[in-house]
Amino acid sequence: MAEAPAPYDVVIIGGGPGGYNAAIRAGQLGLKVACVEMRATLGGTCLNVGCMPSKALLHASEMFDAANSEFAKIGIEVQPKLNLSQMHKSKDDSVTALTKGIEFLFKKNKADWIKGKGKIVGKGKVEVTAADGSVQTLEAKNIVIATGSEPTPLPGVAFEAGKVIDSTGALSLPAVPKKLIVVGAGIIGLELGSVWRRLGAEVTVVEFLDRITPGMDTEVATAFQRTLTKQGMTFKLGAKVTAAKSGKDGVELTVEPSAGGAAETLKADVVLVAIGRRPYTDGLGLETIGVTPDKRGFIDHDHFKVADGVWVIGDVTHGPMLAHKAEEDAVAVIDTIAGKYGHVDYALVPSVVYTFPEVAWVGQTEDQLKAAGVAYKKGKFPFTANSRAKINHETDGFVKVLADAATDKVLGVHIMGPQAGEMIHEAAVTMSFGGASEDIARTCHAHPTRSEAVRQAAMDVEGWMMQA
Ligand SMILES: Cc1cc2nc3c(=O)[nH]c(=O)nc-3n(C[C@H](O)[C@H](O)[C@H](O)COP(=O)(O)OP(=O)(O)OC[C@H]3O[C@@H](n4cnc5c(N)ncnc54)[C@H](O)[C@@H]3O)c2cc1C
């Protein structure tokens, strides 16, 4: 067993958006830092099998779809032909460039990447087992757990390569399935379902709840479902998948009404199970430091601190399972370790669904405000009245601004429309300064832009919307 040289100020276990950003921040602050990652590349779920490859396929399939159904309307006549292996290659090349970029940033910030699986073996000690079986022990003043998450399996439904797959399998299907069933109407299921629908699959989404995208404002979710249905996606809500049987003709799913009742059988070539993700702590040695995850597997913390000299960030702990939340945690934990002020405002973590149109929101939904008994005002503006959206023939969707009835402070902004994921940040910045809807309404917005719809919705809070 090789001896570790000198103790590290920080050893991070996991090289995803939580871990790699923590390593870079630690390097910036002059801390001696190592990041232990067992994958062959840095970047975690997000870069390797999450955000980035899914967005690559969403972008490519959106262009394919537009070429098929939109181009002719604006006078461009083409007959697109799908080259799926090239689409995958382009996605894989982008992922490689991105993961190499993190390696470069590690070197630039003097962060060591220790390749292998990390296990805590006592206070301040992380044992790393490399792929070749060699073992080394790192001494650390601080250990940051950033081990992320993995897809949640569905009871009664075993994964089977190419037939019953998780999100990782759905990123590299070698052929377009004729029929795809997506189990779970959350963000990941709807994004990947959209990819394969655009490429030619018949897509049915089966969801336990009686609505799609829990967490999204109900009014927006209803409009979003209507749009996805218009695009050709079929929804079976309030339905529970209890079993899957695969044979040479595909997969048979047993589906029962969530509220009870007779079961039915649905058939598909491929079933994508996308019912959520669960924290990953396998073989992490938490017991050696007296830490037990909660009932759902998450590691609890008090301002990131789990035990003396042990910290936790990202998907493996509470909060939205999002890359940018993990990144916020990362900076805050390292700043705290370095004696600076580390803080994350979890109320202002934006959410984005990268379908077409996109859906983005920040702050509270109407449902949450009603449940909390908060008196609020609401402004709404449809993209049918926005000149940029009209010119681009992309008028589906609207902007909704929710503001405190007494103070006008913005409490939530919800956007469904193309590039909503880019537009949401004006709301996030306004809210992080405690701004009012009038602040947005009285800020000059360039014309013609979709962002004018945000301004108009803010104007509508006080009833002086001018363009609809
Ligand atoms: C299909 C898909 C699409 C997504 N799209 C988005 C999106 O558009 N936007 C968004 O914000 N989020 C998205 N996410 C979620 C996002 O990927 C996660 O929230 C994010 O990656 C969490 O970062 P993390 O650092 O906490 O964990 P992870 O990214 O999961 O990284 C953890 C890393 O730790 C490593 N590890 C675990 N245990 C050990 C160990 N013992 N030793 C060494 N290494 C270990 C793992 O190999 C992994 O690389 C998506 C996820 C999926 C699956």
Image: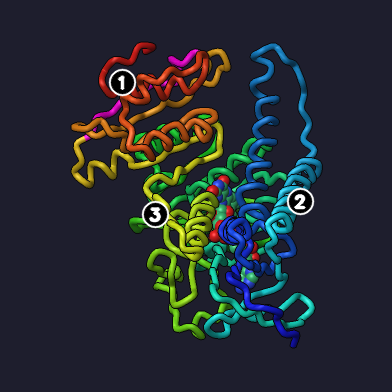
Cβ at disc 1 under 8 Å from ligand 1? no
Mark 2 nearby-residue class (10 Å; few <14, some 14–19, many ≥20): some
Q: Quadrant of the N terminus?
A: bottom right
Residue 271 lies in magenta, yes or no? Answer: no
Q: Which residue is mark 1?
A: 460
Disc 2 secondary structure class: helix
Q: Quadrant of residue 354?
A: top right
Q: Nearer the viewer, mark 3 or mark 2?
A: 2
Q: Quadrant of residue 5?
A: bottom right
| Quarter of the rendered image showing ligand 1 | bottom right
Q: Quadrant of the C terminus?
A: top left
Residue 166 seen in the figure: no
Disc 3 from disc 2: Cα separation: 43 Å
Q: Which residue is mark 3?
A: 257
Give the residues drawn in magenta, as a range: 376-387
* Label 1–label 2 contact, CB within 8 A: no
Cβ at disc 3 under 8 Å from ligand 1? no
- Where residue 381 appears, x then y in whole percent? 38, 21
Mark 3 nearby-residue class (10 Å; few <14, some 14–19, many ≥20): some
In the image: residue 38, left or right of residue 241: right
Label of residue 96 in the image: 2
Number of on-image labels: 3
Disc 3 secondary structure class: strand
In the image: residue 216, left or right of residue 167: left
The answer to which of marks 3 and 2 sits earlier in the sequence is: 2
Q: Residue at x 32, y 20 (%)?
A: 459
Disc 1 secondary structure class: helix
Residue 44 seen in the figure: yes
Q: In the rendered image of this protein, does residue 422 appear above or below residue 388? A: below
Which amino acid does the dot numbered 1 rest on?
Answer: Asp
